[in-house]
Amino acid sequence: MKPPCFDILAPHYVWIEAVTFGGLLQWCRTALVDQLTEVRRVLVLGEGDGRFVNAFLLRNPNAALDVVDASPEMVARARQRLTGLPGARNVRWHVGDARRFEPDGPPYDLIVTNFFLDCLTAAELQTLVERLARHLEPGGRWLVGDFALPASRLKRIGAHAALAVMYLCFKVVTRIPAGRLEDPGPVLLAHGLTPEQVEHRLGGFLVASLWRRSNG
Ligand SMILES: C[S@@+](CC[C@H](N)C(=O)[O-])C[C@H]1O[C@@H](n2cnc3c(N)ncnc32)[C@H](O)[C@@H]1O
């Protein structure tokens, strides 16, 4: 299946986000970035226009990154954003489908998926986590920033309504395969990752979580 195409959205991504969520999505991407120290090899999937990578490289200029995104427009914007940043030369850009990305080096010690896993169907999520967890070294971490369903019933109703609108828009504009939000938690757990730190906003509608692969 062809990857979704976010090119049309790329020039409008920042302002649409600012109008709909203010600074909350950027909070979600970077809430745990200060925990990401002593990281050497990083895989970032569906990075979009580079706002997480920018914040990460300011703290980790020596880390080596593989950044994968299917949208040439998003990647061009991300590259532009990093111009002049010392760590930018350590980034390898891959324009392509993250569902087929084959890492070619030693294992990563960090995988990052911000607002990317929500683009995948349940089956795609399973396959991707199963494949990539093998490329995470023991003790390595996986950062997830994404929407989630709040625990409170009332807030869940609001979240379902907001997600229905978002999925409809993204399906029409970008042709994402997913039609609903899947919880990546059980899949990560099933592949040997356990949550280390979790932060949330909007009553649990936005969650930033850091998972660690067991040492065994
Ligand atoms: C909702 S945007 C999130 C962008 C960014 N991570 C953020 O925090 O806003 C999803 C991003 O993932 C990319 N993407 C979606 N499906 C993809 C796939 N199968 N392979 C590679 N990139 C994909 C899109 O091009 C887009 O840049």
Image (spheres, rainbow, N blue to C red):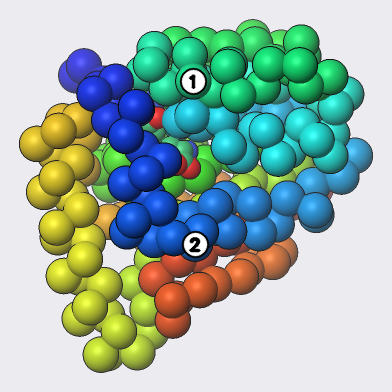
Residue depicted at 54% across the width and 72% down the height:
200
* Visible residue check, residue 179: no
**Where in the figure is residue 107, as x and y percent of width and height?**
73, 24
Q: Relative to 167, does residue 155 appear above or below in the rendering?
A: below
Determine the residue positioned at 50% across, 44% down. Answer: 114
Residue at image x 49%, y 62%? 24
Screen quadrant of the N terminus = top left
- Disc marking residue 129: none
Residue 190 in the figure: left or right of residue 32: left
Amino acid at pointer 1: Arg
Q: Earlier in the sequence, mark 2 or mark 1?
A: 2
Per the image, the residue denoted by label 2 is 24
In this view of the protein, which residue sits in the foreground, 143 or 87?
A: 87
Tell me if residue 99 comes above or below residue 28 in the rendering. above
Label 2 sits on what residue type?
A: Leu
Image position of 27 (left or right of 90)? left
Pointer 1 local density, CA inside 10 Å: few below 14, some 14–19, many at least 20:
some
Q: Residue at x 77, y 32 (%)?
A: 57
Which one is nearer the viewer's eye here, 152 or 31?
31
Q: Nearer the viewer, residue 165 or 187?
A: 165
Residue where numbered disc 1 is placed: 77
Callout 2 secondary element: helix
Label 1: which secondary element: helix
Q: Where is residue 82, by image quadrant?
A: top right
Q: Is residue 207 visible?
A: yes
Which of the 4 image quarters holds residue 106? top right
Ligand 1 resides in the quarter of the picture at top left
